[in-house]
Image (cartoon, grey):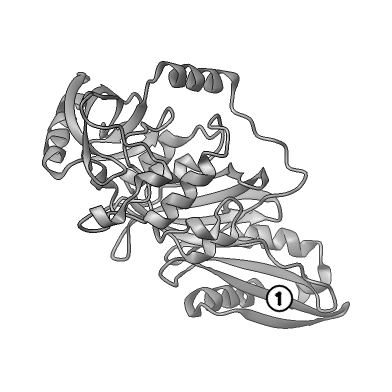
Amino acid sequence: MTIETLMPDVMTVASVGETPREFASWQRVVQRALAKMPAVYDSLTTARLADALSSARDRAEEVDLRIPTRAGLHELKLRPVFGPAGDVHAVRMWIGPAAAAVAEPRAAVGAIWDLDTQTLQQPSGITRLSGVPAEEYAPRMSIAEVFHRMKAFDRHSEVLDLLYEPVAGAKMQFDVAVPHNSGRPGRWRVTIRARDDGRTRGAWWLIEDVSSEDQPATWSTLERVGLREAHRRAGTHLAVIELERTSISHWLTDPAPWIRWDYLFQPVDVFHPDDRARLIDIGGRMAAGDTAGVTVRALNYSGDYTPTLMLLYPYPGYSARQLAIAQLVRVADDVPMVEPHRDSFDVRQRRAPIGYDDQLRHRLACRMNRSPVY
């Protein structure tokens, strides 16, 4: 059983084995489980179990509790799941006979979405999850990069709503397939709680690897694949732009090849600093339902900027009206096209690093070996 601890003094069940539980009461779930183990039920009180869980969470320590029963010695094992700051984002719990073999729990990590930097902070342990090679690990990642790793996912709007407007009590859980370079996609279970307190303005995440050999294959819909292929052949590039914070939140098509949007220290660096205020001003027009066009300088893979026309449309169904759909068109024919190939990087030409270049090189090399149709 995995019990999430993403909010202070709140514990609910994220998963029981392979089954998602979507924030169920841990007391109720545990009592039902113990009802199938009468001897343990008589020897382990809810209060004692709550103390053990609180100890594992607050002290960030493993807990092993021996439970004598009429049916023989049993054990309670609690294993904390850590986030990037060393906090406990969840506690893994196992109860069973002391003589039983205990399987190694599947990989799980905590992550933190920080709204001010618009990045997902993640520990190095995330490389133990399917679909995250160690060579591609970076301490921070934009939400656009997170979405780009997901296959056949269609809840982007809900996630963005929670992340960009963190309201106390907002939460969600979903399973998603993630491509894997070695073959069959893996699968993650993501549990998120919004936070706006002294520790975090954004959200805390729990990511569990729930990959299995017999999991059903996940495919994009025919409509999604067809539209993506049509846009690819037409050379159209569409993105969701967060206007208030001037960053790319999600690519609706293949990313524009002349724009460096990934593996940046700061997602806002995708647009020239002098153009960001103009994007913020356009946000008011989007809120009124208008469309707009603006030419901005977009970062390219040589560290320079390429003039890019953005045709902006209101993002339907988003209450805060901070998001817009943008069609991006490269307008400078006299500026060399710098696409994300390995030989486009020349660190010596840059005044200062702007992102995680080594990880980006590895990611792009793997991406070019895969079919772009997800």
Left or right: 71 as drawn, with respect to 246: right
Give 156 or 56, whichever is nearer the viewer: 156
Callout 1 crowding tier (Cα within 10 Å): few <14, some 14–19, many ≥20: some
**Residue of label 1:** 76
> Is the residue 301 above or below the residue 125 in the image?
above
Q: Which part of the image, by quadrant, shows the N terminus?
A: bottom right
| Residue 217, image x, y percentages | 70, 35
Query: At label 1, which amino acid type do we have?
Result: Leu
**Residue projecting furthest to the right:** 71
Residue 138 shows up from this direction:
yes
| Residue 256, image x, y percentages | 36, 31
Q: How many callouts does the rendering have?
A: 1
> Is the residue 314 above or below the residue 148 in the image?
above
Left or right: 82 as drawn, with respect to 217: left
| Residue 225, image x, y percentages | 55, 22
Left or right: 157 as drawn, with respect to 328: right
Helix, strand or loop at label 1? It is strand
Q: Which part of the image, by quadrant, shows the C terminus?
A: top right
> Is the residue 8 above or below the residue 114 in the image?
below
Give 14 or 211, whichever is nearer the viewer: 211
Quadrant of the rendered image containing residue 315:
top left
Q: Residue at x 24, y 47 (%)?
A: 269
| Residue 52, image x, y percentages | 59, 77
Q: Residue at x 66, y 61 (%)?
A: 106
Quadrant of the rendered image containing residue 285:
top left
Q: Residue at x 22, y 23 (%)?
A: 331
Give 366 or 187, whichever is nearer the viewer: 366
Residue 203 shows up from this direction:
no
> Is the residue 37 above or below the residue 324 in the image?
below
